[in-house]
Amino acid sequence: MQKKISALIFLTFFITPQAYSLTEIKKPKLIVVLIIDQFRADYLTRFKERFLPAKNSNGAVGGFNYLMTNGAYFPYAQYDILQSMTGPGHATVLSGAFPYQSGIPLNDWYDSQLGKNIYCVEDEAYPIVGLLDNHNRIGVSPKNFIGSTVGDELKNAGYPSKVISIALKDRAAVLMGGHRADLALWFDPKSFQWISSKFYLPEGVLPTWVAKLNEEVKIKKSPMKIWSTKLQETMKSYFATTSVYPNDKKLVGKIGPVFNHGIAACSPEELSSPYGLELTAQAALRAIDFYNLGKNKTPDLLAISFSSHDYVGHAFGPNSKEIEDMTVSEDRVISTLLNNLKNKIPGGLNDVIVVLSADHGVAPNSDWLIKNKMDAGRVDVGLLQSKIEDFLNLKYGKIESAKKWITYVVDFNFYINREVAKSKKINITEIEEDIKKILQIEEAFAFVFTHADYNKRSLPPGMHERQILKTYFAGRSGDVIAIPKPFFVNGDENTTTHMTGYSYDRTVPLILLGAPFKHGTIPKIVDVIDLAPTLSILSGTIPPSSSEGRVLTEAFNP
């Protein structure tokens, strides 16, 4: 009997490929995380025929097709949080933590104790570096982010690894980099240059390579840049005309509603074209050279977020030639990055782990959906707030003209003025219930819950309860939160937006490319929080402090 048990243990060891392979994994020289802002899961399949081949006759690798063919490709990875947007998404990617732990439930919120709005990465203690005039510019750091990232754990383990994070958006760069990044770099659209903060550069001076890059960026041969479609005119486009409703949007008004788009050089609008991708990739390649990334004994980490896709998506929507062309442009830029990694890193791509994912998806345009017989709509938040103010004034008596019952509304998060409530001697919970009753009768909302509901765990059912518990952060999330019905959005200037936990907002692709990983599609829904522990086991560190995910063992070679 004892011999049979010993034999069984012996056989189990050798026929369990995951247990064996994970212990034999060689640490990568470099981990490159590519995040595309607002890149919905279906873009890789909808536009696949437009992408470069996986490899060409010269041995050069393509972009998306190479990643999908040669990496472990999960078509559906989800955030499963209440409100999908840039701050929470980028805070989750490399921490494996949901917003209720990371402290980043929204891009910005109202702090009742400080009596002001707070941007998710603002910190007055660390002024901006790289601008001659910092007047009215808030400082930036990861102060509001709680916990650690994959890069932080590389540092905490004592490895002399380099951790660099780059994006056009400051919150994307800062939240991916964590607390111990050697540098987080982002782009200032007003001065049109790369900047950082004293949190990363205590001496207040940009690195020489960044200063040189800024000089090059400002050298323009023409005051006007033309964004013309890369789609071959002989090939049928999915979208015959630009589907923008209406055509007088803020960004569209400056660059025109249809191709070709004329864009002023060195303008914020230029970042909303494929040029923004090129700028980001250029900075990443310079960082690889300057820091000798991938040439050290321990793994280095380079996190890159392509913000331009989000700008275009908000302006034109997911059913536009512009978003199709932007995706095609990303394919080319990623191909350039991969081929540079192949040539720059000793051992080529065999010594590199490449991750592709996104921070969130996006909703179809509500006006377009209505025209196509879908239940959808826009909410006039200003009108809604007026209804609340009128009701509370009528019930409790008017307040000083300069004050309001609601101090701030963002993404259907309503923040109550505690000073007014205190002066009227009214319990906050009572005001929460009043607001909830008003919002519940609105056609656009599926559910409404309050901070008191959260504390009592008296929450909307199913998916919504699960996402609330993963997201709500007391003091930063609203006192009252309305959950819209599918395809209902706030009626702002954007053609469309993202702000829910529905599939179109929460579902993104996830690809893991590298020697340890399988090749091809894995038809399984996974969570984005699974990425952090998966990268941690590759780098030989513990998962980030608040990581709740699992190792994606099904992605590994047997």
Image: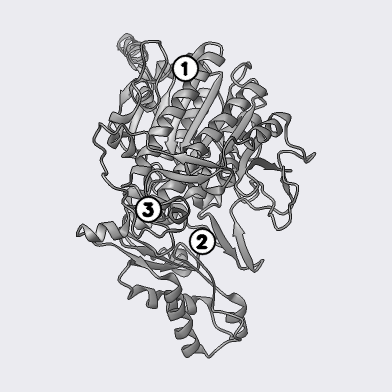
Q: Which residue is mark 1?
A: 23
Q: Quadrant of residue 248?
A: bottom left
Quarter of the picture containing the N terminus is top left
User: Is 138 left, or right, of 285 in this rendering?
Assistant: right
Quarter of the picture containing the C terminus is top left
CB-based contact (under 8 Å), mark 3 and mark 1: no
The answer for how far apart the CA atoms under marks 3 and 2 are is: 15 Å
CB-based contact (under 8 Å), mark 2 and mark 1: no
Query: Does the image show residue 344?
Result: yes
Front-lying residue, 531 or 251: 251
SS under mark 1: helix
- In this view, 456 is above or below 328: below
The answer for how far apart the CA atoms under marks 2 and 1 are is: 42 Å
Q: Which residue is mark 3?
A: 501
User: Is 449 left, or right, of 441 in this rendering?
Assistant: right
Could you tell me which residue is drawn at 61 percent across and 86 percent down? 400
| Disc 1 residue type (three-letter) | Thr
Q: Which residue is mark 2?
A: 477
Could you tell me which residue is drawn at 60 percent across and 56 percent down? 119
The spot of residue 404 in percent (x, y) is: 56, 79
Front-lying residue, 487 or 324: 324
SS under mark 3: loop
| Disc 2 residue type (three-letter) | Ser
Query: Does the image show residue 550?
Result: no
| Applied colour scheme | one colour
The answer to which of marks 3 and 1 sits earlier in the sequence is 1
